[in-house]
Image (cartoon, grey):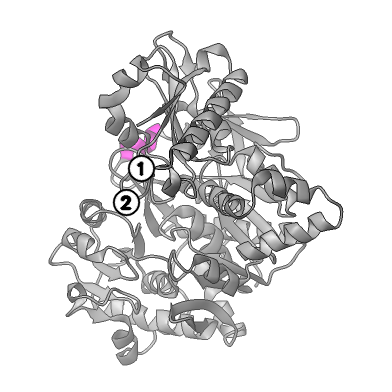
Amino acid sequence: MTTSPTTLILDHACEHARTRGGEVYLTQPVGGGKVVDYSWAEVIDQSRRMAAHLQSLGFERGARVAILSKNCAHFIMAELAIWLGGYTTVAIFPTETAETVRYVLEHSEASLLFVGKLDTWPAQAPGVPAHLPRIALPLAPHTRDVEGYDTWDSVIGRTAPLAGPPDRRGDELAMLIYTSGSTGQPKGVMTTFDAFSRAAEGFAAHTARQSGGREDHRVLSYLPLAHSFERSCVEGSSLVSGRVQVFFAESLDTFIQDIKRARPTVFISVPRLWLKFQQGVFAKMPPAKLNRLLGIPLLGRLVARKVLTGLGLEHVQLAASGSAPIPPELITWYRRLGLSILEGYGMTEDSSYSFASTVGANAPGYVGVAQVGVMYRIADNGEILIKSPGQCIGYYKQPELTRECFTADGYFHTGDLGEIDARGLLKLTGRAKELFKTSKGKFVAPSPIENRLNAHPMVELSMVSGVGQPAAYAIVVVAETLRPRLSDQAVRADVTTQLTQLLHDVNRELPEYEHLRMLVVAREPWSIENRCLTPIMKIRRNSIETAVAPQIEAWYAAQGAVLWA
């Protein structure tokens, strides 16, 4: 489809329904190894029928309509229906608590809620105001909590489709994206149709360029669609392209089978999952043995192929990582397997469209070059300032915060610190708000140190802290494969020995004022459920620091380089 500055995301989608209506767009697992395929024509027909129903309810143009659901085919259809009907989407992370669900629904003044595929709906349901109309999507929980709701299937079965071309302006709000946030209440980022469309087009073009011009791709959508990255890079770019088949994951237990079903040619993930994949490989074959085999001509290629096939990634042409820094050593390891992971960098406020590595411009430890149309500069204090085609227009109901976050000439204050090398590659060096002072009066940037720790095969996650202390320290979560064996004293002793060496190695690479006093092994893994991770698996520093605060004094008084919480 020809793209012009006035072409919006709905124009792309409706054109695909007209020109390639019979082609499969979405593939949804429904249990028991079965899937349901939805063609472009079916997706747009169902969305038009639901759009007509929403209009029949008399909502004013631009009214906010919410979606609370894990990724599924009807999440995308519900969003298209909201847009076609003349409304604004408010997607809520499917792991949020009832308290946050209520906050988002009330703050956005949502007029209706789509309830979709969820794991903890009975605990979330009390957060939905009693007066709010609800519609259950096909994979909504089969519990008494959704009894009496109107259902998607019943609505589209009795409603004629909304006719005519899409009727939306570029300056209208397409969505409010409530940032998951590592502290405080989420903020509603206002994204227009023009911004989202330009970012989606940019991602579609980027994918085609990095895969040799190929446009027909298969992708597994499992990172939260409520987040900007998956929304722009997967949903948005697939709506623009028309030649991307989107598969969905059934559950955490079936994840590898879901990957193998999709046989993705594009696979986008976050550092934590790339690490988990590696640790799963190491659980089957010790790192030293695998390294030795990979170094043998011919055999090494066969072993690498077998490893990727076991992960379901043997067809991947474009692999990417985002949301947090990925250890350079991990990128190097995957490259030995024949999988080149390209890093990217973006944020909710620019539809995740700012920097990305390319086949010709990438390096471990760097997040790439500016995307097409993106302008940037580095402020005197090292902060990255960005002006992107996907840029938001501010924060919902927070005009003062909006003014604070933009420069007079329209650049967004990212809050991230970075530097640009001679090739135009951006290296993130920390986050301004994460910098902390030890009692020696020196600032410590935690992220680069955490990156070094996370590169060790025994470490799943880490957090560096030490505000006002004589020296910094780090808490580490050990690898999932190790955790069940920690009751074995021999295993624990080996972990202590290796982490002691890790502490020594990391400190040797750091200036003295950043040296870590100790590594503390976390008592339990951090998760979204225990509020130590955000829905996109970034660590919640404030939550973790608050939880361990009563133990800090004892840790600093204790002897030894490695402590067990």
Circle 2 residues within 10 Å: few <14, some 14–19, many ≥20: few
Question: What secondary structure is found at the residue carrying circle 2?
Answer: loop
Q: Position of residue 386 (x, y in %)?
A: 55, 38
Q: Is residue 88 left or right of residue 298?
A: left
Residue that sits furthest to the left in the current view:
130
Q: Residue at x 13, y 67 (%)?
A: 131
- The answer, for residue 372, to whether it is visible in the render is no
Magenta-colored span = 399-404
- The answer, for residue 354, to whether it is visible in the render is yes
Q: Is residue 429 left or right of residue 337?
A: left
Q: Is residue 90 left or right of residue 497?
A: left
Please, what is the dominant secondary structure of the magenta stretch?
helix
Choose mark 2 or mark 1, whichever is in front. 1
Decide which of 347, 99 is in the foreground and name it.
Answer: 99
Q: Residue at x 67, y 60 (%)?
A: 308
Residue ID for mark 1: 524
Residue ID for mark 2: 529
Question: What secondary structure is found at the residue carrying circle 1?
Answer: loop
Residue that sits furthest to the right in the current view:
297
Residue that sits furthest to the top in the current view:
440
Q: Residue at x 44, y 56 (%)?
A: 192
What distance separates the C-alpha of mark 2 from that of mark 1?
12 Å
